Image (tube, helix red, strand yellow):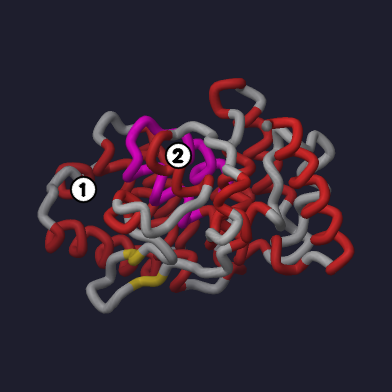
Amino acid sequence: MFLIPRMLDPNMMVRRAVMLLAMRLMQATSPVVVINILSDNIGHKNPRVRQLTVDIVTAALLTHPRSDFDLPALCGIAVPALVDQKKSVRHAAMECVAVIAQALGAGKLHPLMSEIELLEAEPRFEGVMAAVQVRLARRQLPRVNDSGLVEYAVFAMSAAARGTVTGVDIDWIKTGTYCPASPAKSDSVEIKAHSISPSSRCNAGMSAKSLSKLPWEKEASEVCNYIMQYKTCLLFQS
C-alpha cells in the first residue's frame, strides 16, 4: 500500500500527515473501507507500521459516530496487538481496546471479551484479560490532540518507567506478561483497579458473559463480591 513507506518514517510530522490523510480518506469514503484496507498492516514486520495502524483505528473511533463501524471486526484487529512483541504496539492496542469498549457500551462487551478469551486460551498470554480489565477500570480514554495524533490516556511509558503509575495493565504493556499485585501496594491505583477487576486466573467464573459491563457500571453488590474474591486470591498466592 502506498502509505506504508510513510508509516515507516520515525519523523512525527510524517506520521501526523499519514494520520490526517487516513482521516480524510475516511471522510471521503467511510471508516470501514479505510480500516479494512489498513487492517493487513497489523501483521507488518515493522512495529512503527503496526502501532500507527492501531492508532488510526483509535483516532477514527474518537472522531466518527460508533454507527460508522463494524465494532466486532475492530475487536479482531486490536486484541491480537495486545500481545505484540513490541511494547509500543501493546500500548497502542490497550488504548484502542479502551475506546472500543466505550463504543460497544454497557452490557455489549461480549465481542471484545470473547476475542480476549480466545487469546488468553494460549498459556503464554494468560493475564491479558486482567490487564484489560484494569485498564478499563481507569475510566479514562485517549484523545486526538491538536496535532492529529493519538495521545494516550492515564499513563505514558516515561511515567510508567519511573514507577509513578502502577498496575497490571502497565506491567503487561512493559513486559507482555502477567505480574500479580502485591498486597502491600493497597494504596496504589493497581489495587483500586484490581478490586473491581480480579485476575482471570484467580476467578475462572469471570467469563465474557460476566464481563459484559464496564467495571464502573457494575452494581455495588457485584463490586463487593469481586473484592472478596480478590482477597481470597491473594491468600492463595501468598
User: Which tag is nearer the camera, tag 1 or tag 2?
Assistant: 2
What is the spatial separation of the Cα atoms under label 1 and label 2, in whole angstroms? 17 Å
Which of the two discs, 1 and 2, labels the residue nearer the N terminus?
Answer: 1
- Residue that badge 1 annotates: 7
In the picture provided, is 52 more to the left or to the right than 4?
Answer: right
Q: Residue at x 58, y 43 (%)?
A: 181
Residue 169's disc is none
Label 2: few (<14), some (14–19) or many (≥20) C-alpha neighbours in 10 Å: many
Amino acid, disc 1: Met
| Residue segment shown in magenta | 75-96
Q: Tell me: residue 37, above or below residue 126.
A: below
- Residue that badge 2 annotates: 81
Secondary structure category for the residue under label 2:
helix
Q: Where is residue 176 drawn, in percent x and y?
A: 44, 34
Q: Residue at x 81, y 46 (%)?
A: 229
Label 1: few (<14), some (14–19) or many (≥20) C-alpha neighbours in 10 Å: many
- Would you identify the image quadrant in which residue 189 lies? bottom right
Q: Tell me: residue 233, above or below residue 105.
A: above
Q: Where is residue 144 drawn, in percent x and y?
A: 35, 71
Q: Residue at x 89, y 64 (%)?
A: 221
Foreground residue among 6 and 1: 6
Secondary structure category for the residue under label 1:
helix
Amino acid, disc 2: Ala
Q: Residue at x 66, y 31 (%)?
A: 118
Q: Tell me: residue 139, above or below residue 185.
A: below
Looking at the rendering, in which quadrant would you find the C terminus? top right
- Would you identify the image quadrant in which residue 237 lies? top right
